[in-house]
Image: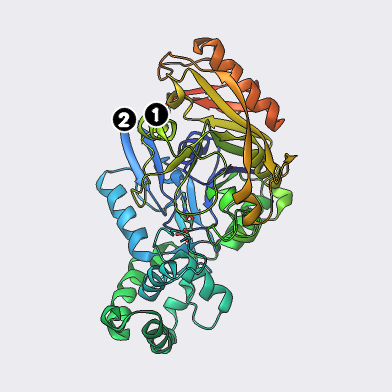
Amino acid sequence: MPGTCIIGLQWGDEAKGKIVDLFTREHDIVVRYQGGANAGHTVVVGGEVYKLSLLPSGVLTPGVTCVIAGGVVMNPAKAIEELDELAARKVQDFDNLLLSDRLHVIFPWHFAEDRAMDRNTSDGENIGTTGRGIGPCYRDKVGRSYAVRLGDMYRDTFPDQVRHIVTEKNRVLASMLPAEEFKPLDADAILREYRAYAERLQPYVTDTTEFLLTAAEKGKRILFEGAQGALLDVDHGTYPFVTSSNSSGVGISNGSGVPGKYIKLVMGVVKAYSTRVGGGPFPTEQDNAIGQRIRDQGNEYGTVTKRPRRCGWLDAVAVRYTARLSGVDSICIMLLDVLSGFDELKICTAYEIDGQRTTVFPSHVDEIRKVKPIYETLAGWQEDLTGARSMEDLPVAAHEYLDRISQLLNLPVELVSVGPDRAQTIPVLAGSSLSV
Ligand code: IMP
């Protein structure tokens, strides 16, 4: 069974990092294939907290090869910072990291454009990007004229390429920014900085598409680590309030180069409630004391940006849609412990739009904005779940909550997470490959 995928089914921050870390030991290779340093992932091992945004969560497991594939956009300074931090904490040496020569590199102009563009959104609501230059870098990738791939940085043409792009970007930024905010980019300074990054990263750079195809053909076990969540998918999410890559299951092959025939198991990661960071519609949002309570109990603040996350009830309409879209086989239900202490819990089971009931997730943002969620109310529980280690340790109401989610999604529950540590995980599915 070569390919397993882990996909967030909401708006990101579903605690995928923990799941990837748990399943990494069953695999030879872990692959990040889309997004960039906008994707904060937290992994807790033996009480030690590791916060990563670019390197795959798999780097915490020795003996596993970690790949950052061609579909990722990379800020090289961030990659080096995370490598240095893990080396300082003696996690492991990094002979086993591979960076695709096809991946696109984020440059200072991308940060400047991200800040300028987000402020300029026309319909009054900002996307609220993470400001990491992700969208502008993907835009240049598709536009091709001003893009730099990692492999380009080792070519004699690199200085001319940067000088040409800087001339053009200075023109664009001057037109986007108020005069007092515009600081022209200095091509020579950028070249010095990026040559140093290129030198430092050179040992890791390779053709990861060829590496992964060969590995898949040989039956190596590959774990694909999705970033963000499927509702932020650029094609199938709550467009335009999305990220700029395919963060649902549809992105695995285009980002990694590994065809779907090698992907045998897709696990969907679902928070026991919903959160969203940044702008955009969020039908089950609780902009009230309930939302604040979830935020407090779940410490719902962004890993990357530290922004308070918007919180609300679980939306089974949205998650059923993203699970189908991503070809999910089983689900991991995360942060169940956060819901302790509520007298009752709600799950959105259908939408009302213009007086019509539907269970179809709308394709247009204007329809999503009109949604009135139809809720089912379930009993809550008062017990602290963080010490639960098996299903028998969970109260009846928690069982009923999990069963209802499984029923609504028509998917089996693979595991339940009741805290950040590896140990705070309850395997559920008989025959699960998880060994906690
Ligand atoms: P960008 O990816 O920085 O362009 O941001 C676009 C939208 O995606 C914003 O609403 C961000 O808050 C959201 N976003 C991007 N990455 C993540 C993530 O890893 N978790 C949650 N939201 C994210």
Where is residue 201 shown, x and y percent of the image?
A: 37, 65
The image quadrant of residue 375 is top right
Where is residue 351 shown, x and y percent of the image?
A: 67, 39
Q: Residue at x 47, y 54 (%)?
A: 279
The residue that mark 1 highlights is 421
Image side of residue 279 versus residue 299, left or right:
right
The image quadrant of residue 209 is bottom right
Marks 2 & 1, CB-CB < 8 Å contact: yes
In the image, 352 versus 324, the foreground residue is 352
Q: Residue at x 48, y 51 (%)?
A: 66
The residue that mark 2 highlights is 47
Can you say whether 65 is above or below 434 in the image? below
In the image, 409 versus 357, the foreground residue is 357
The amino acid type of the residue labelled 2 equals Gly
The amino acid type of the residue labelled 1 equals Asp
- Disc 2 is placed on an element classified as loop
How is this picture coloured?
A: rainbow
Work out whether mark 2 precedes mark 1 in sequence or the reverse, and give the earlier one: 2
**Can the viewer see residue 186?**
yes
Image quadrant holding the N terminus, namely top right
Where is residue 301 shown, x and y percent of the image?
A: 36, 42
Query: Marks 2/1: CA distance?
Result: 7 Å
The image quadrant of residue 360 is top right
Image side of residue 75 versus residue 242, left or right:
left
Image side of residue 192 versus residue 15, left or right:
left
- Disc 1 is placed on an element classified as loop
